[in-house]
Image (cartoon, rainbow, N blue to C red):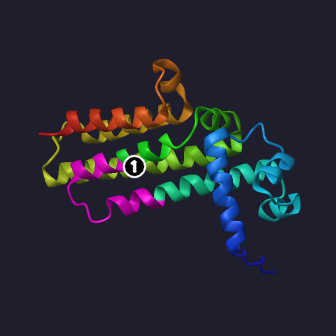
Amino acid sequence: MRPEPRRRPTARQRALLADLEALFLAEGFAAFTLDDLAARLRCSKSTLYALAPSKEQLAVKVVTQFFRGAAERIEERIDGIDDARKLIGEYLAGVSEHLNRASATFMRDLAEFGPAREAYQLNSRFAAKRIRQFIDKGVADGVFRDVHARLVAEMTGLIVEGIQTGVLGRRTDVSDAEAFTALGELLLGGLNK
């Protein structure tokens, strides 16, 4: 038996998901009930259930949408850039800009809700992989010093993980967006010839 093909969301559902994303980024998602969300979005609960079978699954869907959309826009932003320094700078500036849209409440809810946190972790692992690729490119192109480039790339992955898990934010009292900006400055300052 073949699985049922996934239906694409309708225009109304896409609009609701965009509204939910904006609401969650501004106010978080943990405190809302489905009744609250239906009232805020001026729709029925059954309309929300058509998006996801529970509030928790709806939160995961919206968080995943936010990170997927951010990743797509960041990739578009760096499309056509060949210089590794500019790639790293633009990539991390894009990450920072997207995370700047998220309120502290959203980031706290994200950290405290495992399934949504997993979406952030997946996105962070992808970001660390992309940064490693940019570092490798910069070394191959001769614009970065080849001083343990693989080690720097792995350390970058650990820093991204520290940002994503909230460890760096708690220890330094900076937002994830600020941490990604600082990571860009650190990398570019340390790798440039």
43 or 158: nearer the viewer: 43
Q: Position of residue 7 (x, y in %)?
A: 72, 76
Membership of 87 in magenta stretch? yes
Identify which residue is drawn at 29% across, 46% down. Answer: 89
Q: Position of residue 88 (x, y in %)?
A: 30, 47
Identify which residue is drawn at 54% across, 57% down. Answer: 68
Q: Position of residue 10 (x, y in %)?
A: 71, 74
Q: Position of residue 122 (x, y in %)?
A: 55, 49
**Label 1 crowd bin: few (<14), some (14–19), many (20+), radius 10 Å:** many
Instruction: Name the residue at the top extreme.
Output: 171
Looking at the figure, which quarter contains the C terminus? top left
Identify which residue is drawn at 28% across, 35% down. Answer: 185
- Mark 1 falls on what kind of element? helix
Identify which residue is drawn at 69% across, 33% down. Answer: 112
Q: Is residue 31 above or below residue 42?
A: above
Where is residue 189, by image quadrant?
top left
67 or 130: nearer the viewer: 67
Q: Is residue 135 above or below residue 3?
A: above
- Provide the residue span drawn in magenta: 72-92
58 or 24: nearer the viewer: 24
- Magenta part, dominant SS: helix
Instruction: Name the residue at the bottom extreme.
Output: 1
Looking at the figure, which quarter contains the N terminus? bottom right
Q: Amino acid at mark 1?
A: Gly
In the image: residue 118, left or right of residue 39: left
Q: Is residue 37 above or below residue 166?
A: below
Membership of 164 in magenta stretch? no
User: What is the count of numbered marks?
Assistant: 1
Q: Which residue is mark 1?
A: 94
Where is residue 45, by image quadrant?
bottom right
